[in-house]
Image (cartoon, coloured by chain):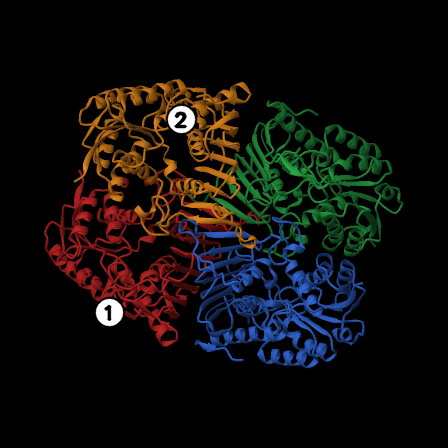
Chain colours: A green, B blue, C red, D orange
């Protein structure tokens, strides 16, 4: 018999939808003791029809429009936070105080100060917690981690990351409101740095260890946009684009870049690592593929024959690949949404004696430190050391 | 308020799982009047634990081990047939007689004679029916159909299809049993012809119209394999590989090939069309991509500038692409399973006044005719005309 | 001190140019005893200006407009035949009789009967001879041969070849004349079969051994074209497209196709081989790349780790790759013309005690046999055995 | 009648070979008044056999071992400098004084001070001059320039460049000597910055205009290597890797990186530009390809239909592509060496009334300014403005 785990999802937007789906799918594809139950979804009281439609689509038991009431409910085990960034801090503090498990969308907070309090809160409360840096559970990225752990990259020299999109090029795109709050710094904290580079930084530090120093440059290409809330043209306060150089504690060096002005790039979250024994390249637009250059075997030290070296494209759908034995058969891909399903599977497994779940809020704090340093560097025009 | 549609899935294997998932997911991602309810799953009485695990995983109301009892149930609206091929005929006839809607896995039947009776049965009963040639609903393949309908291919000259895999190269792979019945002609009817080329033929005739003549060659590379049921080494009776030439009614010509001996190919279902105005290439191993060569605009006749021509890789995840507005955002892929979800969405929509659903059993009969002609040609060593 | 080798090139068109260049370049990049000297070029007396421009561009010592005079010259060692196909037979016979070395463009002859006489002539005369199936010397294709010889493909199951172009789709393209004689069967012998599939067949038999049986279909999409010579619209007598199935003596099976109606394909000469230990794919439009799927080591039998398998793209520009130590450095490609340079290097080397040169006229005769069988099969509508 | 142009090539290494070939090939493939004559090659007196072999291979009239004598010769028109970087300055000054045309390999000089004197010298002498930033004449890169000029990129937002290789990862690779002088700062000036990033910077400024500010980081991964000249282990003084951020005068932003430690990258000279109307990506390892994302037509402003957008791979071998009408036919690539042939063709054309040749020494000086600023920034740890 399975154990029900009552989920409250705060926020009925894109992320609320992705999380709801994953909570339902995790029981279909993974053998777990806990069975998530969609107990309550919480959305704005301004649009009750939308909220009810969301409830019906996903089969929630009930709806709420005040997140504080959700936290007060005894029949909720997990507070899953899918609301805009400026609300994360207050909700996490309340949820932790109420002894709820906390699942929080990224970026964790508006800044390091907030994030530190949030970490303190969940750790004091001793509640299980996670930040949904879901791309760690793209099978191809998890495979990179495995290759690193197996020594197949070896001593790392270079790390490169981009997260490029193109959806805000037109000056006609407004800022604010329900759909475009990510363009409003009061709600989002920052632009591409917190939204996209946070992913890249989380992945980078997971794969390649701590970042020590950064120097950054940010740009806001469109200086003013109509604001949905005020109806008036207002200054754009976020970073449209951000690029930075980094050095890692392990001696390797890295370049990072993110923008929403890269015409033709939709979800171009890429990473490349070059090491002594091999290299990898990944691109989220082709999420089932991993490009791997195999140079030398980490155990025998034997090199691949010179006439046989080449970048190989691994179709990461074999049973032997991370997560894939839970899905279909070789050659059959899984979709975007299962980065969340895989994440929740690991989270539930950690509640059942499986490996400790990562990334927690504490781990996300270290990402926040880099994000803050990047923004500070861009502002000051100089290198910034990462504290913490 | 939605209308429940009670589903009985016969077969709890790979396809039973894929269908169960799609019946559940269709309500989450498409706005439909009908809401599928997983009423009963039917599996072998030999392994009740497996059957119950399947029920629990997918939330079925009940289980049965005798498909005839399922058909007798008043609380079932749809009989969804996910059992081996040699059982399709009898079940379809019974389901149609009972007035149930029929969903049937491919290939439709063991041969044309069976298929004709099945078509007659569902048409006499007047029941909605479909064969799950699910790859028509890969968004990229549906996009090809749209491009053709828009005139972007123009007069077609060439069609090429392959469906290559590599999982039976080892002579140690047995035949028969629950997992490998596709290697046993008594259960499967044929080898790659019915299993894989049936997909290629369905897609080809959908996109390029009727095939008129074929000449084929088949091969069985491993002549004997241990049979799971008997425990003895027995002759292999299926075609391991099949290749054929075809001419289409529209004057174009085609090559088709399928094998399970193409080392490195996992689900290499490809198609290429070359026409006067443009060309397309698709590969199911990268299902979100469509390669498109745009030469001339079908309406204006204007050619692309000579220095700008090139094959373009369309990442078929834009809102404007078939089915994609129902899923995530540009750059976010959907997985293998949603070829079924999209299929069921269209099927349900057809019950609600939407476009007539294709492919029906009648359409699948035309595919069966080509399959039979291919096998006959291989046997006789000569060209065979397609009847019908 | 090097030994001069006096070359006469017959034909000043595209191939005459490619050969002239290669004769000059071979001494720059390969260490050889023989040093080719461009002694005489022979072209039509109708256009002396063109002929003289050709002479000057390439630095020929002299010009001729009658090929028979060229053969009579004592100061010529090699007759290099770059004229239309219908002239090959007579010239080869005369050149052999005169004791000249013979270099002949493909296809060797108009048919097997001619080809047999040509082989007999050169063998009786005992003159060194070659047919410029130059694609054997694409480094990536030569690498395939090496991989096969090393056992890295292992038992072969499948062979696939295409040679697709698109330059004759427009009905406005005329036939005949100096530029488009390949569309006139009286001059070319056949269409894509002799022009393009001859390459594919030569490569296939080199890599995979003799073809035993074929069944073919040909098509002429545009039935009439203006003829350059007559100025009138005349029936098109060549095959615009040809596809055939083949079985090889080694038990593997193959598909072949060629067309000039594949919109977007320019020089799409591809081949794929699937074997027990590995697979390869090559495409002449990306001539420096070889896709290789490595499954098992031929000596140890050790399989590549399951999570590391994938098609690898070998950039065939390492020093260890065929011919490449003679060119630049890794990552620097060579161009189309050096398939001829590499060919002449091997031919000259064979004169100096190096490995016996292939393909000779005798080898090209075996390709001619397959071409003739393909055309016969298409005509008769049945399988044809390859004689010889 | 053509006009002979007497060439003296200084340096018989890799570049001497590439230049010699291009001087010979330019007359074969381009119609020009000037016909280069290989008059004299100049190499080290330490190895006369090598020098004579070089002379014979390329057909030079004579050899010299003292470059000053070469400059004194009346029968030399062009001094083509293919010797290590630390010699460029003195030779250019002498050649200019002697009124010779100057062709100089990149990087132009050891530093800006040298470069300024060199520019002054050639400009004072009024001699035609060029620096062989040969990659401008890769047809695909020239096509990018054309696309930009046609408005197909539109307002630029982002520029990205890498030039990555992997040939010095092993600490066993020595420094110095004839082959590895690029690892010795006394001879090379700098490491990857001058050798590889100079190319990237030249291309970037050509395509995207002046760079205004940079912030850089360099690294020397292997701190000591055996020196070929001294035979002793000595500190490595060059930059093994360099990365920098840049802002351009046109308001766009850029990332640049180069290394010889990117396992699996051989000649990975890439660039990407993102603009309002379109984007391009190029990779020198696949030099005949250009990836182009077409979003909107620059004249009509009409957008590509949403369901048809995608990155297209232009096979830059059409007659309509830069330089390609001079070579073969569509689908036939040219090799690395013809970046030099195309360069010399344009240089000679400029002598004959064609477009003014770029890049001259003056242009190369602007590249040198960026290189120096990059190295200064890396040393100081701060942003540096580009002077000039």
Q: Where is residue B75, by image quadrant?
A: bottom right
Q: Position of residue D287 (x, y in %)?
A: 41, 43
The answer to whether A300 is drawn above or below residue D121 in the figure is below
Taking depth in this image into account, of B4 and C321 the one nearest to the observer is B4
Image quarter in which the N terminus of chain D is found: top left
Taking depth in this image into account, of B316 and A348 the one nearest to the observer is B316
From the viewer's perspective, tell me whether residue A37 is left or right of residue D263.
right
Residue in the picture at 29% in, 68% down: C388
Label 1 environment density (alpha carbons within 10 Å; few <14, some 14–19, many ≥20): few
Q: Chain of mark 2?
A: D
Q: Position of residue C306 (x, y in %)?
A: 58, 50
**Which residue is under mark 2?**
D182
**Which residue is under mark 1?**
C113
The numbered disc on residue B21 is: none
The answer to whether D56 is drawn above or below residue D110 in the figure is below
Label 1 secondary element: helix
Q: Where is residue A78, by image quadrant?
A: top right
Image quarter in which the C terminus of chain D is found: top left
Q: Position of residue B115 (x, y in %)?
A: 61, 78
Label 2 environment density (alpha carbons within 10 Å; few <14, some 14–19, many ≥20): many
Examine the rendering and report whether any part of residue B81 can be seen.
no
């Amino acid at each position: 018999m399975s154990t029900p785990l009552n989920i409250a999802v705060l926020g009925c937007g894109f992320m609320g939808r992705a999380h709801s789906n994953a909570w339902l799918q995790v029981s279909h594809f993974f053998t777990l003791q806990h069975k998530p139950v969609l107990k309550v979804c919480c959305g704005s009281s301004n649009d009750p029809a939308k909220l009810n439609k969301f409830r019906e689509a996903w089969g929630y038991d009930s709806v709420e429009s005040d997140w504080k009431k959700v936290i007060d409910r005894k029949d909720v085990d997990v507070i899953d936070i899918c609301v805009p960034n400026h609300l994360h801090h207050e909700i996490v503090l309340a949820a932790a105080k109420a002894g709820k498990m906390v699942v929080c969308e990224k970026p964790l907070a508006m800044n390091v100060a907030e994030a530190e309090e949030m970490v303190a809160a969940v750790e004091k409360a001793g509640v299980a917690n996670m930040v949904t840096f879901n791309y760690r559970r793209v099978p191809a990225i998890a495979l990179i981690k495995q290759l690193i752990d197996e020594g197949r990259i070896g001593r790392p020299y270079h790390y490169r990351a981009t997260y490029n999109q193109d959806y805000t090029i037109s000056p006609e795109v407004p800022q604010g409101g329900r759909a475009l709050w990510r363009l409003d710094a009061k709600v989002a904290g920052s632009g591409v740095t917190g939204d996209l580079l946070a992913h890249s930084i989380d992945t980078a530090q997971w794969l390649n260890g701590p970042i020590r120093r950064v120097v950054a440059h940010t740009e806001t290409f469109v200086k003013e946009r109509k604001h949905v809330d005020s109806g008036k043209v207002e200054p754009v306060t976020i970073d449209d684009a951000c690029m930075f150089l980094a050095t890692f504690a392990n001696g390797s060096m890295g370049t990072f870049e993110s923008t929403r002005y890269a015409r033709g790039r939709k979800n171009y979250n890429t990473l490349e690592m070059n090491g002594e024994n091999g290299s990898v390249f990944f691109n989220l637009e082709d999420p089932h593929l991993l490009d791997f250059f195999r140079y030398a075997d980490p155990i025998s030290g034997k090199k691949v024959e010179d006439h046989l070296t080449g970048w190989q494209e691994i179709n990461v759908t074999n049973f032997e690949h991370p997560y894939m034995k839970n899905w279909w058969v070789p050659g059959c891909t899984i979709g975007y949404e299962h980065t969340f399903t895989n994440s929740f599977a690991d989270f539930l497994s950690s509640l059942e004696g499986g490996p400790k779940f990562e990334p927690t809020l504490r781990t996300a704090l270290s990402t926040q430190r880099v994000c803050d340093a990047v923004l500070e560097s861009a502002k000051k025009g100089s290198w910034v050391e990462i504290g913490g």
